[in-house]
Image (cartoon, rainbow, N blue to C red):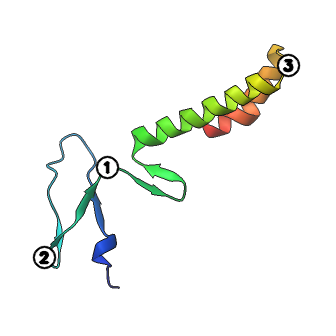
Amino acid sequence: MLFNIEKCKVMHFGHNNSLVDYCMNSMQLQNIMDKRDLAIVIKWDKQCIAAVKQANKVLGMIKRNFVDRFKDTIMALCKSLVRPHL
């Protein structure tokens, strides 16, 4: 299988990583910090931030659109609408 060198990228993980530059066919590969693939951000800190932002949006929608503020109602809405994002 042939690699498309223009599409190949390098992502370094870990704190003790030496950040080595990699080459294929004497062409240096691009270093990237994060990658989005199938709606998932590959880099845990950014994925967590994106999930929390989406959950906060849903919480805001619940606050704006539901007048009933009883504990049972809010808990049911949070369990069914917010928890799947987290």
Mark 3 residue type: Val
Mark 2 residue type: Ser
Q: Mark 1 points at which residue?
A: 33
Helix or strand or loop: what does disc 3 sit on?
Answer: loop
Q: Answer few, some or many: residues within 10 Å of disc 1's Cα (few below 14, many 20 plus, some between 14 and 19).
A: few
Q: State the CA–CA distance, disc 2 to disc 3.
A: 64 Å
Q: Mark 2 points at which residue?
A: 26
Residue situated in front as seen by the camera: 71 or 58: 58
Q: Answer few, some or many: residues within 10 Å of disc 2's Cα (few below 14, many 20 plus, some between 14 and 19).
A: few
Is residue 78 found left or right of 12 in the rendered image?
right
The answer to which of marks 2 and 3 sits earlier in the sequence is 2
Q: Mark 3 points at which residue?
A: 67
Mark 1 residue type: Met
Residue situated in front as seen by the camera: 17 or 46: 46
Q: Give how far across and how far down residue 29 sits, in percent.
A: 22, 66
Instruction: Determine the image quadrant of residue 15.
Output: top left
Give yes or no for contact between labels 2 and 3 (Cβ–Cβ under 8 Å). Answer: no
Q: Answer few, some or many: residues within 10 Å of disc 3's Cα (few below 14, many 20 plus, some between 14 and 19).
A: few
